[in-house]
Image (spheres, coloured by chain):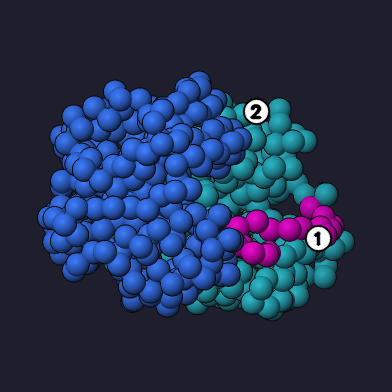
Chain colours: A blue, B cyan
Amino acid sequence: MSIIVLGTVALDTVKTPLGSKNNLLGGSAAHFSMSARLFTQVNLVAIIGEDFPQPYIQFLHQRGIVLTSLMQEKGKTFKWEGSYEGDLNTALTHHTELGVLTIFKPRITAAQRGIKNIFLANVDPDIQRHLLTHMQNPHLVGLDSMNYWIQHKRSALKRVLKKIDIFVANDQEARSLSGEQNLIKAAQCLSSYGPKMVLIKKGEHGVLFYRKKQTFALPAYPIRKVVDPTGAGDTFAGGFMGYLAKARKLDERTIKRALAYGTIAASFNVEDFGLYRTSRLTHADLQNRLRKFKNCFHL
Amino acid sequence: MSIIVLGTVALDTVKTPLGSKNNLLGGSAAHFSMSARLFTQVNLVAIIGEDFPQPYIQFLHQRGIVLTSLMQEKGKTFKWEGSYEGDLNTALTHHTELGVLTIFKPRITAAQRGIKNIFLANVDPDIQRHLLTHMQNPHLVGLDSMNYWIQHKRSALKRVLKKIDIFVANDQEARSLSGEQNLIKAAQCLSSYGPKMVLIKKGEHGVLFYRKKQTFALPAYPIRKVVDPTGAGDTFAGGFMGYLAKARKLDERTIKRALAYGTIAASFNVEDFGLYRTSRLTHADLQNRLRKFKNCFHL
């Protein structure tokens, strides 16, 4: 089954200990799409400005991503400028320019309204809810957010959380929104807001999954040379949700496999800047690394 | 095969969000022993003062720990006072009283000199080297240290690292001693100082193991109610080294199994203060939780 992702398509300027790049194709929906496309057809819902480079549209199109609802409007594309230092776990934001994001009202086609798998990547929670109300018969809805919305639009965020199945958050966000330090307790608390499943991303430390009576942890796939972690969380979510959309099941085994695919996809993402690595990724690459990853756990 | 552990036996006063306790039996060698004893006979080498409560000696003795080389000297027992806040990952030390530790010169029996499995838990690296030079035919030597020695006795520490097989460090220590932020690179660098194997403990985020061409990561066993993390790292090392001493092999599968036992033992340790939980731990408890842990990884 296909999937629809709402989020940002951005121009990222990033500096890491291994180099720097200007105006890379980035954004939550772009990173999500690049891994989800390996499992299912991805419909991207986002907004770009007049300044958005035409080759980037081609780039997404050539990777099979459906761009019918990628709106191009007067104004500038959303831009993010940031850097990483030390252990590369935390991004320092130097500058953001919202541009057309401030006027974003997602519009989708009649056919897209019937898509059953939905991922609401990080944008304003009111926009997330707006899209969700237009979906006819959601089967599986995932949502990601960020500290900014937790601080500034907490009630809007909690309102949309009631309507979703899977909440994807990083450890800081999970702690901040729940007020719980222990991540299992945090997940349990977040689940009480609505989502049956909570997935806490811990960057280089892997991921924690929570569903009533089930808690799994997986480490990250160990990567020696992390070049650029930007988008790793969205790449993870893309692999995870993409696999679930394909599998059409939510049993324990399927969830674990989805977590593993998300982990593997994210491990490729951090090996190069922006979408350089994940845009060349094949299903065979995923399988190969999954085999090595599984081998870690022959205990 | 039996194991000999050099380290501290201490009186710990600890405060966590879930309570506080005074003068608990603690110390690196005590925590290590309490999990290693589940796999092999443990010989404890440490020093205590005149003020050390007799019931604590009985307590260790009753758990089968060989106390022949637990020296009691004039003066006070080593005392540590600390607390944990927030995510319980970092201990805040309020006070340490070295007491008899300042005059510690380990003495072991002739029979103990022949023991082939050795763990040098956290004490002054010169004391670690002193014991090691008295061992006749070391087969497998593990070592743990701490930031204090990395900062103040770096060359003594590097000298003893040349003589050991397995270096056990937490992530901060690994980064600080190697100067590398990426933990795989840090492990590789630390291995170049001598130890063939490097094991980096990441607290609630699990563990990373490095040996030439092999890197494994395991998450921690998810614990909802962490009461007191004091000694979790030493409990981990005890399970890990204890299992290796019993298995008498160092192949990939054995290492992974040892990492899993260390992880499981540590997960019990944090569920209660001091040695309350691990002193009641049985091999059946370990097996039970190991089964659940392995089940996480049926990917």
Q: Which numbered dot is residue B94? A: 1
Which of the pair A225/B25 is nearer the observer? A225
Location of residue A272 in the rendering, given as x and y in whole percent from the top left corner: 38, 27
- Residue lying furthest front: A74
Mark 1: few, some, or many residues within 10 Å (few <14, many ≥20)? few
> Does label 1 or label 2 sit earlier along the sequence?
1
Query: Residue drawn at (76%, 58%), measured in percent from left and top?
Result: B93
Q: Which residues are magenta?
A: B84-101
Mark 2: few, some, or many residues within 10 Å (few <14, many ≥20)? some
Q: What kind of residue is marked 2?
A: Arg
Query: Badge 2 is on which residue?
Result: B159
Occupied quadrant, residue A147: bottom right
Location of residue A34 in the rendering, given as x and y in whole percent from the top left corner: 27, 38
Q: Is residue A282 above or below residue A178?
A: above
- Residue A90 seen: yes
Does the stretch in magenta take in A110?
no
Q: Chain of mark 1?
A: B
Q: Is residue A204 above or below residue A146?
A: above
Q: Is residue A64 left or right of residue B163?
A: left
The kind of secondary structure element at disc 2 is helix
